[in-house]
Amino acid sequence: MIRLSAPRRAALQRLVLPVLVLLSVTMIVVGKLDQVVFEPLRISFTDAAAPTLDALSRPIAAAGNLIDHARGVINLYQENGRLEEENRRLLHWQQAALTLASENAQLRSLLRLVPEAAISYVTARVIANSGGVYARNLMVNAGSGAGVERGQAAITGDGLVGRVVEVGTRAARILLVTDLNSRVPVIVERSRQRAILSGDNSERPLLEYLDPASAVRVGDRIITSGEGGVFPPDLPVGVVSRVNGEAPRVEPYVGLSRVEYLRIVDYGLASGLPKPVAGAPRSMRRATPVTTAGMKHH
Amino acid sequence: MTSRIADVPVVPQVDSPVSRLLPVATTAAAAILSIQPVHISAYAALAPAFMLMAVYHWAIYRPDLLPASAVFLIGIGHDLLAGGSLGVTAVVLLLARAVVVRYRRWFPDRAFPFVWGGFTLLTASGMLVLWVLHSLLGAGTVEFRSSIFRAVLTISLFPFASFLLGRTQRALMGAR
């Protein structure tokens, strides 16, 4: 180490804080101006930390499961009744589904429809989340090594979780539908109206760009429309929970704070997320190219 | 409950090399804790500001062992892993550390409620600074309510954090 005199060292010490604060503010500004400049750093750091986070999150997940078990035991009797009722309903639906499936197969062969491409998926575990009010995303322990690519949709058995925005070798980041930057082209199942599900970092994202004349009702099912080739169509997203206010709000089917395992699905969509262009303004690099989608399908 | 400044040896000759790492290690652990997925519905991803608790504690009792450079690196590391704007956490934590170090001398021989009160002030201002920063960065549509909830959660959990940190401090540094 360089030998400095005491007063010089003291002066240097006093400089440390302002320099670091300035450096942090610079990083904030640079990050705002150019979205992608820190991405390689973020990806390599995430890849390096992924195994540790994976290992650390397991005991906490186990503890959470224990609490759920305890709650389950306490509510055993009611839970049993509820499950029996649900089981009866689901058996009805199973019958309906089987009938529809065979009818579907017959109609397809009648029309000589080209069979859909096989869907491949990767199951991944959530190892970290953004933990904050200002960003809603999850980190999962599957990366390009497992076949995960940017733009792929993430789902659970209940519905859509989000989409992949960053991919490392060992880990990937999923942007949730509730995140401020999330835009999902959707359709109201009942009325077939198109809309965009926009996250705003709250628990219930907004349904925007609806035809103002139309009436959306509480309880309407929202599914993906497949517009723009960004998300595959007909994925369940949520139900309308509120219609007054600036825009209707949707309650997602997936309990986003409780997701432990999810599936990243490769539907073989060629377009997916375009690579962000360095230097372009933030509004142009949304998850969904809204304007071009509108133009493409007219 | 917490060790008082008068009892902590000023000349750190008692510290072993391992215990000298304790402040940085606990603050880094707090960073990792705040991005842990906790699968309880009520949690809703509003993690308490664990890092703020750690920085506050160490800035009062052993600021020499939690230098600004360590706080900066931990803040950057947290931002990289949590996916937020790089630098935001670093700024808030650096400012928090600076403010606490400056007013350090008000804390010796004070009862815990005073320390807790100081932390409440720090959390309130910290959440406000965060909200202002994010509003400037274009996320101003976020309701203030979530920040208030997070602040209340953080303040409520501070006694536990302080107790834990104080215990580990005494055990490893032989302060008492």
Image (tube, coloured by chain):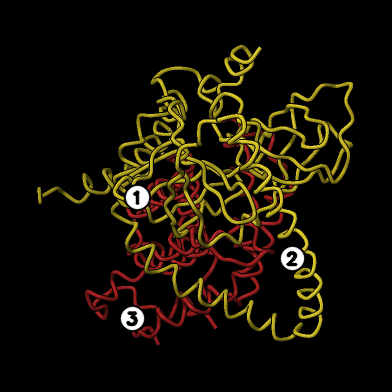
Chain colours: A yellow, B red
Depicted A244 relative to depicted A69: above or below: above
Please, which chain is the residue tagged with disc 1 on? A
Residue under the image location 44 percent in, 77 percent down: B6
User: Foreground: B128 or A164?
Assistant: A164
Please identify, in this view, whether the residue under mark 2 or under mark 1 is nearer the observer: 2
Tell me, yes or no, whether dots 2 and 3 are on the same chain.
no
Q: Which mark is in front, 2 or 3?
A: 2
Mark 2 / mark 1, whichever is N-terminal:
1
Seen in the picture, residue A71 relative to A213 is either above or below; the reply is below
Instruction: Report if the CB atoms under discs 2 and 3 are less than 8 Å apart.
Output: no
Q: Residue flagged by tag 2: what amino acid is it?
A: Leu
Q: Nearer the viewer, residue A12 or B42?
A: B42
Considering the numbered disc 3 on the image, is that residue within a helix, a strand or a loop? helix
Q: Is residue B108 rendered to the left or right of residue A97? A: left
Q: Chain of mark 3?
A: B
Q: Are marks 2 and 1 on the same chain?
A: yes
Residue located 76% across and 82% down the image: A75
Query: Where residue A192 sits: x, y (%)?
Result: 78, 30
Q: Which residue is mark 3?
A: B173
Q: Amino acid at mark 3?
A: Met
The residue wearing badge 2 is A91
CA neighbours of label 2 inside 10 A, class few (<14), some (14 to 19), many (20+): few
Q: Which residue is mark 1?
A: A46
Left or right: residue B12 versus residue B48 is: left
Estimate the x, y position of residue B63 in percent, counting from the top left: 38, 62
Question: Are there few (<14), some (14-19), or many (20+) residues within 10 Å of tag 3?
Answer: many
Q: Specify the quadrant of the image occupied by residue B114.
A: bottom right
Residue B34 appears at what percent x and percent y? 50, 60
Helix, strand or loop at label 1? It is helix
- Mark 3 and mark 1: Cα distance apart in space: 33 Å
Which quarter of the rendering shows the C terminus of chain B? bottom left
